[in-house]
């Protein structure tokens, strides 16, 4: 088509041929995350099981003021540093279920 990338280009843009959303990966899964700031507000005892609450990953935003044992599937590097600095520890759910 003559003029396809010149004066007729605007007609092609108006048809919606190129889309607006972009590419969506087929295997993408979203993980339910929680920050340390929210964990410190939730913690009533020295052990908190985030896996049973439905959270899959712990992120390192915020501070932890007391030592906690946190049960969660995954955690970020910064979250691990802050928990260890406060005197707590991170545990995977598989390790808690074994005797």
Image (tube, rainbow, N blue to C red):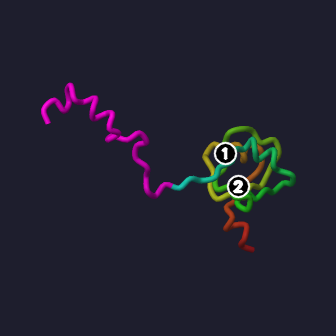
* Residue 5 colored in magenta in the image: yes
- In this picture, which residue range is highlighted in magenta? 1-28
Left/right placement of residue 54 relative to residue 1 reads right
Q: Position of residue 3 (x, y in %)?
A: 16, 29
Image position, residue 7 (x, y; %): 21, 25
Task: Kindly indicate whether the residue at mark 1 contacts the one at mark 2 (C-beta within 8 angstroms).
Answer: yes
| Residue lying at the far right of the rendered structure | 44
Residue that label 1 marks: 79
Q: Position of residue 13 (x, y in %)?
A: 31, 33
Up/down of 97 relative to 41, above or below: below
- Could you tell which of marks 2 and 1 lies nearer the N-terminus? 1
> For the point 69% across and 58% down, which residue is it?
54
Element under disc 2:
strand
Q: Which residue is mark 2?
A: 90
Where residue 40 sits, quadrant-wise, is top right
Check if residue 68 falls in the magenta segment: no
Callout 1: few (<14), some (14-19), or many (20+) C-alpha neighbours within 10 Å? many
Q: Say the numbered circle drawn on residue 11.
A: none
The quadrant in which residue 96 appears is bottom right
Residue positioned 65% across, 49% down in the render: 33
Q: Nearer the viewer, residue 56 or 23?
A: 23
Q: Residue 85 occupies which quadrant of the picture? A: top right
Q: Nearer the viewer, residue 29 or 23?
A: 23
């Amino acid at each position: 088509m003559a003029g396809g990338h010149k004066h007729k280009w605007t007609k092609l843009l108006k048809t919606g041929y190129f889309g607006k959303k972009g590419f969506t990966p087929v295997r993408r899964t979203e993980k339910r995350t929680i920050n340390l700031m929210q964990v410190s507000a939730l913690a009533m005892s020295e052990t908190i099981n985030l896996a049973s609450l439905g959270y899959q990953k712990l992120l390192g935003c915020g501070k932890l003021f007391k030592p906690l044992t946190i049960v969660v599937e995954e955690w970020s590097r910064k979250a691990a540093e802050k928990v260890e600095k406060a005197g707590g520890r991170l545990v995977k759910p598989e390790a808690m279920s074994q005797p």
